[in-house]
Image (cartoon, rainbow, N blue to C red):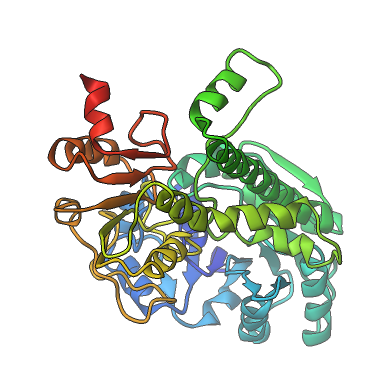
Amino acid sequence: MFEYEACIIGTGRVGLPLGLSLVDVGVKATGVDVDPNLIAAVKEGRMPFHEPGYDELVASGDFVVHDTPEVVSKSAAIIMTVGTPLHNHIETDLSQIQRVLESIKDYIRKDHLIILRSTVAPGTTAYVHKWLERNTPFIVGEDILLSFCPERIAEGVAYKELRTLPQIVGGEDDASRDAAAELFGKLAPEVMKTNFITAELVKLFCNISRYVHFAMANQFALVADNFGANIYETRRLANHNYPRSSLAMPGFTAGTCLRKDFGMINEWNAYPDMMLSAWKMNEYTPAMLVDHLMKRTSIHDCRIAVLGFSFKADTDDIRDSLVPKLHRYIERQLPIEIRISDHNLPDPIHEPSAHKPLKNWPVADALEDIDCVFVATNHTGYGDVLKELGRTRPQAWVADIWNVGGIDQIFYQAGDLVAVEV
């Protein structure tokens, strides 16, 4: 009856790895997207972004991305993997899901299985259920099926985790749960069935618990620096062979999941809580780095380097990165120059909040005659870069919240790295 077993709508950093992985295990899958550059890249057989493990799969040409949704009518399962951001006022933005539903409603057929996979606020799948029954002639659970099957992969390890992590399947009827479980059972080692709201909360609780955990680490880093203590030494002593301590490393906590998912629950709470406090702490961390470095040295009329611009180590994803925020706080101090360097990104860097494209400097050029360095992302290789800076520019100050220099200091002068080696 259907030409394809699955159609992925939204073939970005979640949808494309899923589609390619399904093809890899023998599922006939296709995709739909609105990004012409992404479609062109897949057609040319290359990954449009960095995600290890998929170069050969995309080069095979077995997964095709379409620019219109007609192919939905030929696909047994429709998997929605579009963005689910927040509005500016801690309010869930359903516009992308609504646009997808409008675009596919005329192509939905009897026996279709519709799956939401993007992270969604509690009650979103129930909203889609009602929307489908209002805008199509079908009854969910009888004529068509509906399930929420959250993705829980981390960027950079999608190929491994899609095959090793258990898959949660949420549905309100056995037929929907069973159909979704059968599809994802071809990929995941274990499938666990539940209802809509529980599946939605599983994903949110996973992300929010990590967000709060990292916020506590950043709070501890702030407290330690205020008291003149070493956060890395404190953390190491607290965690060493102690079964009830797991203090995380401080760092920028961001990205399209961790930075926003707290709001999908916090939207429904009228009072301050630990999730809102965690958001405030994590969002304050860029300002904290600038403020606490200025307690040690001036950055006004100085040359500043920012190493890293993506939100996570060794990725090319700048969505919801905190580095643009750091860049703006540095700008407020009116340095002579700010040089951004990220070897995972093209030149120039197009960042929506910047009034013009940002020059992406080669790292050696970015550090030439530099006065201060902010290590904004812990990309591989930055530790060696800083040690070389310690030999050529020992007086330069470094703000290194990721501890890539390896000397257990957030703020230090580059020459300290060479002194440790000696």
Q: Residue at x 82, y 52 (%)?
A: 198
**Rendered-image quadrant of the C terminus:** top left
Return the residue nearer the eye: 107 or 258. Answer: 258
In-image side of 186 versus 133 (left or right) = left
- Residue 9 shown left or right of residue 327 in the figure: right
**Residue 276, percent from left and from top:** 73, 58
The foreground one among 307 and 110 is 307
Residue 341 appears anywhere in the view: no
Residue 325: x and y in percent read: 47, 65
Image point (43%, 46%), residue name: 156
On the image, which quarter does residue 84 sit in?
bottom right
Locate residue 390, reporting x and y percent: 20, 37
Question: Image check: 301 left or right of 195?
Answer: left
Q: Residue drawn 28% across and 36% down?
A: 383
Residue found 65% across the figure and 80% down from its top: 95
Say which of 183 and 102 sits in front: 102
x and y percent of residue 186 in the render?
59, 45
Residue 96 drawn above or below residue 1: below
The quadrant in which the N terminus is found is: bottom right
Res. 105 in view: yes
